[in-house]
Amino acid sequence: MKEKIGLVSLGCDKNLVDSEYLLGALLENGYVITSDASEADIIIINTCCFINSAKQESIDTILEMAQYKTSGNCKMLIATGCLAQRYGDAILKEIPELDAVIGTGDFHKLPGLIEKLNNSRLKIITENRSFINYDIKKRVRTSNYFSYVKIAEGCSNCCSYCAIPQIRGPYKSRPIESIKEEVELLVSQGVKEINLVAQDTTSYGMDISGKPSLPDLLRALVDIKGEFWIRILYAYPTHIDDELLELISSSTKIAKYLDIPLQHINDRILRLMNRPINSEQIKKLIEKIRIIVPDITIRTTFIVGFPTESDSDFQELIDFVKIYRFDRVGAFKYSREEGTYAATLKPQVPERVKQERYDQLMTVQQVISKMNNEKMLGSTITVLAESYDPARKMFIGRSQKDAPGVDGTVMFQGEVRQLGRFYRVKITEAFEYDLMGEVVE
Ligand code: SF4
C-alpha cells in the first residue's frame, strides 16, 4: 500500500475545486487519503494569498502541519496553490520543514512527483499558471448536494488592488462541452446545486474561438435532464447584459440570484480601483436587474479602507447600501498587496479606521438583512435539505436565495424523507441571516 496523504485546502471555492481534483488524482495513483494529519505520511497544503490575512493563515497552517514531522508520521510536507505560486522561493527558504512547493499550474504533476522527491527539496513553478484538465470522473467531492464548477481560470481585468492576475495568469475559459460533461456527471451523482465559479464568470468565452458567452453556456446546461439549480457567482458588473438577465428570469433551472462584487460606489475610488464602471452605471444596472428579474437575490461585496478613502467617500457607500438594500453584502478591509498599483497610493487608511468602517457597514447591512428576511414570513419557498442537526432536531438547508458558505440557511422541521431533495417550506421565523420554517409539501 502507498503512503497516506492528508490535504488541507485553504482559500476560495476555486481552490477547493483544485483540491478535489487533486484528491482524485492521488487516489487514482494508489495513495490513501486521511483526514487525520497525525497519521499522514505526506501532508499537502493548498494555500491562498488573496489578502494578508489569507497569507498569514496559509503560513500558520504550513507551520502547524510541519509539527507533524516530529509529533506524527509526516515525512514529506508540500505547499501548493496561490501562496506557493507567488512566494515559492521565500517559503522554501524560510520554512526548512517544507520539502516542495508546487505552483498553481503544476500541481497535477504532484502524484508523479512525490515518488521522485526522496530527501531532495523541490520547487516547481512554471509559466503555466492555470487550468489543468483533470479527469472529472475521479474528482473527490467534499460536499454532498452542491458543487462548484470552474468555468474559467485566471483573470484579465486589471483591478488596481488585486494580485490574482499575476498569480493565476490571464483569463482562460473552459470549453462548453467539458463543463457540460462535468455538470451531467455531478447531476447523475445526486448533486442538486451547481455553482458556476471563476474569477469573473460573466467574461466567459471571450478568449475562445466562436466566443461563446455565459448565456450560451447556461443554455447548454439547462438542457441537462434532472432537478437541479445553477447559481452564478462572481459576475463582473460590466458584462451583465439583458440576454443574461432574461435567461435568469425565464429559466426554472437558473437560480434567481446574482453575486456581483461591486467593490465601491464613489466615482473617484472606482477610478482608482481601475473599475470600468461609475456610480450612475452601477445604480442603473441594479435597477435594471430588479426590473428584468423582480424576485432576484443580489449579493455584493465591498472593499472598505481603500487608499485615500475619506469619511465622506465611505459615507457615500453607506448611503448607497441603505438605499439599494442588497439582500446579501460581504465586505473586506483593503489589504495592501505588493506589486499592485493601489499599494503605491497615498495616504493608506489606518487599520483602526478600516476596522471601524467594516463594523459600521456590516451593522447597517445586518438591519437591512433582518428586514429583508422578515418580508419572507408566511411565504413558502423551495429548500434543498442538506443536513440534520440532532441537537436542535432541525433540518438545515438553503433556498435559491442563499449560496453555500457565504449566505444564510433555512432551518426547518417536518416530514423529510431524504436529504438532498427539495421541499416546500413555510417560513415562520426570521433572523438576521437565517430563516426557520416547516415543511408543507
Ligand atoms: S488567492 Fe485567490 S484564487 Fe487563490 S486561493 Fe486565494 S482566493 Fe482563491
Image: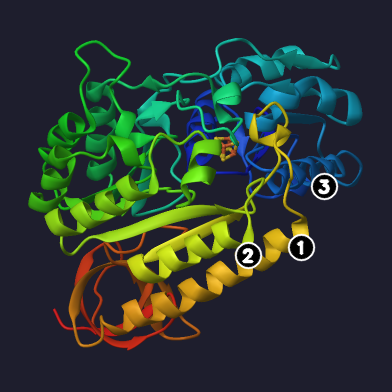
Work out whether mark 1 precedes mark 2 in sequence or the reverse, and give the earlier one: 1
Residue 307 position in % (x across, y down): 67, 45
Does 109 appear above or below 160? above
Say which of marks 1 and 3 sits in front.
1
The disc label shown at residue 149, or none: none
| Quadrant the N terminus occupies | top right
- The residues bearing labels 1 and 2 have C-alpha atoms spaced at a distance of 9 Å
Mark 3 residue crowding within 10 angstroms, few (<14) / some (14–19) / many (20+) = few
Label 1 SS: helix
Q: Is mark 1 within 8 Å of ligand 1?
A: no
**What amino acid is found at the position of numbered circle 3 in the picture?**
Glu
Q: Does the residue labelled 3 lie within 8 Å of ligand 1?
A: no
The residue that appears at 35% across and 63% down in the rendered structure is 402
Task: Provide the residue designation for mark 1.
Answer: 352
Label 3 SS: helix
- The residues bearing labels 2 and 3 have C-alpha atoms spaced at a distance of 32 Å
Task: Provide the residue designation for mark 2.
Answer: 357
Task: Provide the residue designation for mark 3.
Answer: 64
The residue that appears at 50% across and 37% down in the rendered structure is 271
* Residue 192 in sight here: no
- The residues bearing labels 1 and 3 have C-alpha atoms spaced at a distance of 29 Å
Work out whether mark 2 precedes mark 3 in sequence or the reverse, and give the earlier one: 3
Label 2 SS: helix
Picture colour scheme: rainbow
Residue 17 position in % (x across, y down): 47, 37
Q: In which quarter of the image is ligand 1?
A: top right
Asked whether, in this view, residue 65 is left or right of residue 213, the answer is right
**What amino acid is found at the position of numbered circle 1 in the picture?**
Arg
